[in-house]
Image (spheres, helix red, strand yellow):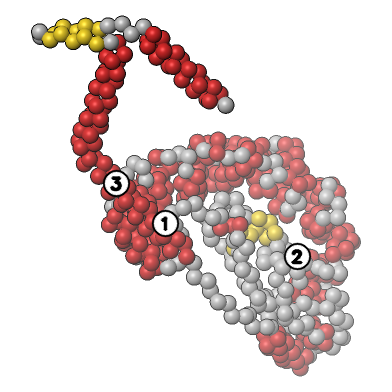
C-alpha cells in the first residue's frame, strides 16, 4: 500500500511539472558553427530524451556484442556444472547403496567433467574404497591433502587407509599432521591421544589433553587426566617414588573414587609413613567402589602388624559397606589369617547358598585350616569350578588380573571396568550328578584344575563316605568323563549367521564403535584371556 501511494505521488509531481512547463513554453535559441536553431523548451526537452534513448540502445547493443564470449563461457560452465553436480550426486548415492559399478562410472564421469573439484575427488576416493582399489583411494586422498581447502579431508582418508594396512606409524603421522593443521578436528585429537597412550607417552598425552581441554566437558577431562596420571605413577613407582606419589595424589584429587589411583596412592603414602592420609584416601574410594585391592592396601597400612590387628582394621572397613560381598570376602580373608575361623564362616555364611568362585575357594581354605578336612576342601574346590564368576578387570572382552589404563584390544583409554566377564551368557552344561560328586570326593581326586565343560554342582555339599579305595577313583574318573561328554553333546550349536557386507569407511566422521553392542557367544563356556 505504501508503494502505491509513493508511486501516485511521483506521477502527480511529474504531471504538475509538465503542466507547469506547458503553460510557460518559452523559446530556446542555439547558435553553433553558423547554424541558428530556434525551438521551444518542450521540444528541446523531448529531443534530448530521444537522443538519450538512442544512445542507450546503441550502448546496449555494443555491450552485448563485446560481452558475448563471457556470456557464452558462463553458459557452458553452468551446463558443465549442472552435469557435474548430477554425476556427483548420483555417484554419492551409488556409494551409499553399495553399487560399485555405478559408483566407479559416475566417479569417472565427474572427474572428466569437473577434474580437480573437491567433491569429484571425494567421489573418486569413495568409489575406489568401495571397489577395494586401495592405490586409487590413496592417490585421491593425497590429491586432497595437497590442497588447502581439502587438506583435513585428505588427511582423514589417508589415516583410515593407513589403519586398514596396519601401518601404525603412517596413521600416527597423518593424525599428528591433521591435529597440528586443524586443532579443532575431534578425530585427529582422539587418534593422537590413543597413539600416545598406547606407546606409554603419558607426558605427551597429558599435554595434548590440556591443549584440547576446551573441547571436553569437565567430568570427561578430570577422568581422563586422572587415568593418565595414574598410569604415569605406575610407570614411575619403581624408579622415582616421589614423583609417582605426586602423580597418584593428583589423580586421586581429580577422581577420588578411582580404585587404581586410590590403591596406588594409599600404598605409596603408607610406605612413606603417612598412614592417616592413606587410610582416608582408601576409605573414600572403598565406600564408593569396594574392591579387593583397596582392602589389601588398607590391611597393610602398618608394616609388620599382627594378623589380629589387621583383622580389626578390616572389620572397621567392612562395616562401612554393610551387605557388600567385597567387605565379607575381605573380612573372611583377614579372619582366616588371624585363625578366627568362626568369624570367617560368619562372614561367608550369607553367600554360601549361591557362592562365587572366591567364596568357594575361601571356604576350602577354612576347611583345611580349621579342621584339616581335605575332602570338604576339595568339594568346595569342585564347586568353585562351576560357581558364578567374580568381577575382574575387563575391557572389550579382554580379562586382566590387574588394571590397565588402555585396552589392548581397541586402544581405548580408561576402558577397563571391574565387572563380571561375559555377563548375561547362560550356560547349557548339564548338572553334575550328586553321586558323581560324592564318589569324586571319596576318591580324593584332584579337582583343582579348571574344567571347561563342567557344570554347576548342587548347592549343598554331598555327604562324605567313610571308605576310600582305588576302585572309587576309577569310578570318579569315568563319571567325570561321561558328564563332560554329555555336557558337550547337550550344548546347542550356534545358529548360522549370515554376515552383512558393509561398504568401507568413508572419510566422514566415524561412529563410536564402543556404542555398538558386541555379539555374545552362544556356547556354554568362555575363555579367559590373561596377560
Residue farthest along the left direction in this orientation: 34
Work out whether residue 184 or residue 438 is closer to the camera in this orientation and state it: 184
Q: Is residue 78 above or below residue 40?
A: below
Label 2 neighbour load within 10 Å: few <14, some 14-19, many 20+: some
Residue drawn at the location 20% of the way across and 33% of the way down: 62
Regarding mark 1 in the picture, which secondary structure is present there? helix
Q: In terms of sequence position, does the residue under pointer 2 or pointer 1 come before the other? A: 1
Label 3 neighbour load within 10 Å: few <14, some 14-19, many 20+: few
Residue 75, label in figure: 3
Regarding mark 3 in the picture, which secondary structure is present there? helix
How far is disc 2 from disc 3 in space, using C-alphas? 81 Å
Q: In terms of sequence position, does the residue under pointer 2 or pointer 3 come before the other? A: 3
Residue 259 screen position, x and y as percent: 68, 48
Residue 89, label in figure: 1
Regarding mark 2 in the picture, which secondary structure is present there? helix
Residue 132 screen position, x and y as percent: 38, 66
Which residue is disc 2 drawn over?
A: 358
The reply to whether dot 2 and dot 3 touch (C-beta < 8 Å) is: no
Q: Is residue 176 above or below residue 160?
A: above
Work out whether residue 332 or residue 203 is closer to the camera in this orientation and state it: 203
Work out whether residue 236 or residue 141 is closer to the camera in this orientation and state it: 141
Q: Nearer the viewer, mark 1 or mark 3?
A: 3
How far is disc 2 from disc 1 in space, using C-alphas? 61 Å
Residue drawn at the location 42% of the way across and 68% of the way down: 99
Q: Nearer the viewer, mark 2 or mark 3?
A: 3
Amino acid at each position: 500500500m505504501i508503494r502505491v501511494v509513493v508511486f501516485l505521488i511521483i506521477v502527480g509531481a511529474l504531471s504538475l511539472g509538465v503542466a507547469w512547463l506547458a503553460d510557460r513554453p518559452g523559446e530556446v535559441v542555439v547558435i553553433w558553427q553558423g547554424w541558428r536553431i530556434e525551438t521551444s523548451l518542450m521540444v528541446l526537452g523531448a529531443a534530448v530524451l530521444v537522443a538519450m534513448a538512442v544512445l542507450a540502445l546503441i550502448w546496449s547493443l555494443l555491450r552485448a556484442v563485446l560481452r558475448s564470449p563471457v556470456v557464452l563461457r558462463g553458459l557452458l560452465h553452468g551446463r558443465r556444472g549442472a552435469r557435474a553436480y548430477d554425476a556427483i550426486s548420483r555417484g554419492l548415492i551409488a556409494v551409499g547403496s553399495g553399487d560399485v559399478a555405478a559408483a566407479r562410472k559416475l566417479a569417472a564421469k565427474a572427474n572428466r567433467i569437473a577434474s580437480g573439484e573437491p567433491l569429484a575427488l571425494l567421489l573418486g576416493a569413495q568409489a575406489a574404497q568401495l571397489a577395494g582399489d586401495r592405490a586409487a583411494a590413496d592417490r585421491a586422498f593425497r590429491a586432497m591433502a595437497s590442497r588447502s581447502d581439502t587438506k583435513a579431508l585428505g588427511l582423514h582418508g589417508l589415516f583410515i587407509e593407513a589403519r586398514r594396512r596396519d601401518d601404525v606409524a603412517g596413521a600416527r603421522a597423518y593424525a599428528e599432521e591433521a591435529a597440528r593443521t586443524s586443532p579443532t578436528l575431534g578425530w585427529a585429537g582422539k587418534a593422537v591421544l590413543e597413539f600416545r597412550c598406547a606407546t606409554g607417552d603419558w607426558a605427551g598425552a597429558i599435554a595434548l589433553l590440556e591443549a584440547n581441554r576446551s573441547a571436553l566437558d569437565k567430568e570427561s577431562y578430570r577422568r581422563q587426566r586422572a587415568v593418565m596420571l595414574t598410569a604415569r605413577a605406575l610407570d614411575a613407582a619403581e624408579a622415582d617414588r616421589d614423583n609417582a606419589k605426586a602423580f597418584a595424589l593428583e589423580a586421586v584429587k581429580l577422581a577420588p573414587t578411582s580404585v587404581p589411583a586410590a590403591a596406588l596412592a594409599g600404598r605409596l603414602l603408607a610406605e612413606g609413613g603417612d598412614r592417616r592420609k592413606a587410610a582416608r584416601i582408601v576409605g573414600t574410594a572403598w565406600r564408593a567402589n569396594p574392591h579387593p585391592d583397596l582392602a589389601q592396601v588398607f590391611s597393610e597400612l602398618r608394616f609388620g602388624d599382627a594378623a589380629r590387628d589387621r583383622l580389626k582394621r578390616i572389620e572397621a572397613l567392612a562395616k562401612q559397606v554393610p551387605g557388600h560381598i567385597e567387605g565379607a570376602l575381605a573380612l573372611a580373608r583377614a579372619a582366616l589369617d588371624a585363625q578366627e575361623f568362626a568369624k570367617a564362616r560368619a562372614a561367608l555364611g550369607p553367600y554360601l547358598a549361591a557362592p562365587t568362585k572366591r567364596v568357594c575357594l575361601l571356604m576350602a581354605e577354612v576347611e583345611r585350616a580349621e579342621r584339616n578336612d581335605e575332602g570338604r576342601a576339595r568339594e568346595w574346590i569342585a564347586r568353585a569350578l562351576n560357581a558364578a564368576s567374580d568381577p575382574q578387570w575387563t575391557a572389550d572382552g579382554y580379562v586382566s588380573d590387574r588394571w590397565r589404563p588402555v585396552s589392548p584390544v581397541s586402544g581405548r583409554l580408561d576402558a577397563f571396568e571391574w565387572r563380571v566377564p561375559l555377563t548375561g551368557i547362560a550356560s547349557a552344561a548339564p548338572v553334575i550328578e550328586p553321586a558323581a560328586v560324592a564318589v569324586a570326593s571319596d576318591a580324593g581326586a584332584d579337582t583343582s584344575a579348571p574344567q571347561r565343560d563342567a557344570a554347576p554342582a548342587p548347592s549343598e555339599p554331598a555327604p562324605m563316605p567313610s571308605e576310600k579305595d582305588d576302585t572309587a577313583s576309577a569310578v570318579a574318573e569315568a563319571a567325570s568323563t561321561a558328564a563332560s561328554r554329555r555336557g558337550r553333546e547337550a550344548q546347542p550349536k550356534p545358529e548360522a549367521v549370515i554376515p552383512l557386507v558393509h561398504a568401507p569407511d568413508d572419510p566422514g566422521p566415524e561412529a563410536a564403535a564402543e556404542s555398538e553392542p558386541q555379539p555374545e557367544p552362544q556356547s556354554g563356556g568362555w575363555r579367559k584371556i590373561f596377560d
